[in-house]
C-alpha cells in the first residue's frame, strides 16, 4: 500500500521509561512499514523518539515530566506504604496531565488534517496515558479519531473473577473469594478518590457534558475501541467477564529498538567461554536505582560459585555500583545490556519485577526470580508465581542468603524450566506487532 494511503498514527505514553520503551518499539515497527507516526512525549524523550523514525511532538506544562521528577515534584509519593493508597497517590499526577495531553493530541490531529483532511488517523496510546479520554467522552470542539490502548503493565479492571490487589490477589473462584474481590474493588475506589477528583476537574475544564457517565479510574480502559494486552493468557488472571474491547496480543519481542554499539569490554570473551555454566541475569530496572536493594545482595549471594556466571545490568548508561562494592570473579557488571542479547544466554532471570522484562523472559523460556514491592510490581510477582514460571522473594531488599536460596530452588526443581518452556511455546503462537498493525488498519477503515 502506498505511504499516503496508510493512516496517520499518533502514539502517546505515560512518561516513565518502562512505559515509553514498548511504545517506542511499536513506533519503530510502524515506521519500517511506511506509516507516518507522530509520538507525543515529554521533552526529555526527544532524541529517543526521533531514533525510531517517528516525529516527536512535545508535551507541555504539567504533562512534561518523567520518573526523574517524582522526588522533586511529588515527594509525598514515597511516604505512602505499598498498596492501593500508594497507587492512588500516583494517579494524581497522570490525572492532572490529561489536560495537556488532550491539547497535545488535538495539536497533532490538526497538523494531520492540514496535511491531508481525507486521510484516516488512529491513536495508539499506552494504558496510563489518558489524554484521549476527554475526546472519547464527547468534549466539544475536538477532532476525533479511533483509539487503541496498549497494556504494558498487569491488567487491572473490575472483574468478579479477580481479587485485583493485596496479599490475596489472584483468581476469585469461590463465593468467598468473589466477596473479597468486591471488597477490594470498593477499597480501591475509595482510595483513589483524589485522583478521580482531579480527573473530573480536567473533564469539566474541557467541556465534557455533565450528564456523561464517567467510569471509575480502574475502568477507563474500557472506553477505547481496543485494549491490547502485551502478554500471553498464561501470565494473566482468567476472567469470565472481560471488557468487550480486551484482547491478548502476546509478549512483545523486544523492549529496546536501539542498536547496541557500546558493549562492555568483557562481553565477547565471557559469552564465548560459558561452556556448561549457568548464567544468572540480574536487573533492577530503571525506576528503582538503589542497587543495594537487589543487585548488591545478588552479587554477594552468588559469589564463589564456579559453575555460575552472574551478569548484572544496571539499566542506565553511565551508572556504577555503590562505592565499596566488590565484584567477584564470576560476576560481570554492565551499565546497559539489551535483553535481546542477554537473554540468549541467561538460564535464570533475577528481577525486581518490571513487566516488560518479565514478559521478555517468558518469550525466551527463562525461569524468573522476582522481588519487587513498589507500584505494580507486586501484581507482576503474583502472576509470576501463579503461572508457575518463577519464585517470589517477597521482598525488594533480600539478603544474600535469600537470593542464593531462591537460585538453588529454581535450579534444582525442573518444574520452573518446564513451565518456562511451555509459556515460551504459547508466546510463539502470537505475533503482537503484526496484530497491532492489523487493528490499526481495521479501525482506519471503520472511520
Image (tube, rainbow, N blue to C red):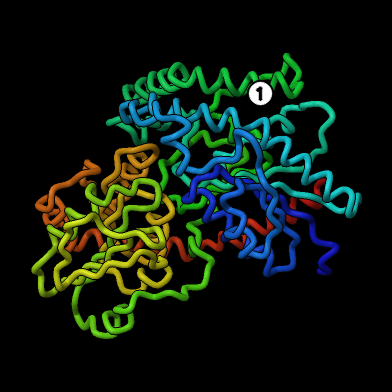
Q: Is residue 348 left or right of residue 20?
A: left
Tell me the element at label 1.
Answer: helix
Q: Is residue 257 left or right of residue 325?
A: right
Quadrant position of the C terminus in the picture: top right
Question: Is residue 116 at all visible to an observer of this figure?
Answer: yes
Q: Quadrant of residue 95?
A: top right
- Residue 68 at x, y percent in the picture: 45, 43
Relative to 434, say whether 216 is above or below.
Answer: above
Q: Quadrant of residue 421?
A: bottom left
Relative to 154, say whether 436 is above or below.
Answer: below
Residue at 40%, 19% in the rendered image: 187
Q: How many marks?
A: 1
Residue at 51%, 26% in the rendered image: 92
- In-front residue for pair 265/303: 265
Q: Is residue 264 left or right of residue 23?
A: left
- Residue 19 at x, y percent in the picture: 51, 48
- Residue 398 at x, y percent in the picture: 17, 46
Q: Which residue is mark 1?
A: 202
Relative to 24, say whether 91 is above or below.
Answer: above
- Residue 199 at x, y percent in the picture: 60, 23
- In-front residue for pair 226/38: 38
Question: Is residue 418 at all visible to an observer of this figure?
Answer: no
- In-front residue for pair 83/283: 283
Residue at 74%, 56% in the rendered image: 441
Residue at 74%, 49% in the rendered image: 122
Amino acid at each position: 500500500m502506498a505511504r499516503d494511503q496508510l493512516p496517520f498514527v499518533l502514539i502517546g505514553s505515560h512518561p516513565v521509561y518502562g512505559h515509553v520503551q514498548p511504545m517506542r518499539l511499536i513506533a519503530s515497527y510502524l515506521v519500517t512499514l511506511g506509516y507516518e507516526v507522530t509520538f507525543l512525549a515529554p521533552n526529555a524523550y526527544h532524541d529517543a523518539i526521533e531514533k525510531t523514525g517517528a516525529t516527536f511532538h512535545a508535551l507541555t506544562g504539567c504533562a512534561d515530566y518523567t520518573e526523574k521528577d517524582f522526588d522533586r515534584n511529588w515527594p509525598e509519593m514515597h511516604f505512602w506504604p505499598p498498596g492501593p493508597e500508594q497507587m492512588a497517590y500516583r494517579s494524581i499526577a497522570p490525572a492532572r496531565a490529561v489536560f495537556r495531553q488532550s491539547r497535545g493530541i488535538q495539536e497533532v490531529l490538526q497538523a494531520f488534517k492540514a496535511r491531508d483532511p481525507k486521510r484516516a488517523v488512529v491513536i495508539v496510546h499506552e494504558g496510563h496515558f489518558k489524554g484521549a479520554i476527554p475526546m472519547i467522552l464527547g468534549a466539544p470542539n475536538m477532532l476525533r479519531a479511533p483509539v487503541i490502548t496498549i497494556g504494558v503493565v498487569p491488567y487491572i479492571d473490575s472483574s468478579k473473577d479477580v481479587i485485583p490487589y493485596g496479599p490475596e490477589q489472584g483468581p476469585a473462584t469461590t463465593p468467598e473469594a468473589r466477596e473479597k474481590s468486591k471488597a477490594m474493588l470498593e477499597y480501591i475506589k475509595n482510595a483513589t478518590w483524589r485522583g478521580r477528583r482531579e480527573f473530573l476537574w480536567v473533564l469539566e475544564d474541557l467541556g465534557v457534558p455533565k450528564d456523561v457517565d464517567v467510569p471509575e479510574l480502574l475502568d477507563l480502559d474500557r472506553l477505547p475501541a481496543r485494549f491490547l494486552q502485551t502478554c500471553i493468557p498464561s501470565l494473566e488472571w482468567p476472567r469470565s467477564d472481560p471488557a468487550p474491547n480486551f484482547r491478548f496480543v502476546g509478549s512483545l519481542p523486544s523492549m529496546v529498538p536501539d542498536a547496541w554499539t557500546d558493549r562492555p569490554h568483557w562481553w565477547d570473551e565471557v559469552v564465548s567461554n560459558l561452556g556448561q555454566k549457568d548464567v544468572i541475569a540480574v536487573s533492577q530496572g530503571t525506576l528503582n536505582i538503589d542497587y543495594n536493594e537487589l543487585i548488591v545482595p545478588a552479587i554477594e549471594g552468588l559469589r564463589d560459585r564456579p559453575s555460575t556466571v552472574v551478569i548484572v545490568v544496571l539499566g542506565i548508561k553511565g551508572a556504577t555500583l555503590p562505592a565499596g562494592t566488590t565484584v567477584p570473579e564470576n560476576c560481570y557488571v554492565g551499565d546497559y545490556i539489551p535483553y535481546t542479547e542477554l537473554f540468549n544466554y541467561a538460564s535464570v532471570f533475577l528481577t525486581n519485577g518490571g513487566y516488560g522484562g518479565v514478559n521478555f523472559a517468558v518469550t525466551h523460556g527463562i525461569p524468573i526470580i522476582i522481588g519487587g514491592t513498589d507500584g505494580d510490581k507486586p501484581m507482576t510477582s503474583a502472576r509470576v508465581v501463579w503461572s508457575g514460571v518463577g519464585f517470589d522473594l517477597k521482598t525488594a531488599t533480600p539478603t544474600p542468603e535469600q537470593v542464593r536460596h531462591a537460585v538453588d530452588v529454581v535450579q534444582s526443581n525442573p518444574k520452573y524450566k518446564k513451565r518456562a518452556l511451555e509459556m515460551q511455546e504459547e508466546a510463539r503462537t502470537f505475533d503482537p506487532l503484526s496484530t497491532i498493525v492489523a487493528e490499526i488498519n481495521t479501525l482506519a477503515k471503520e472511520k
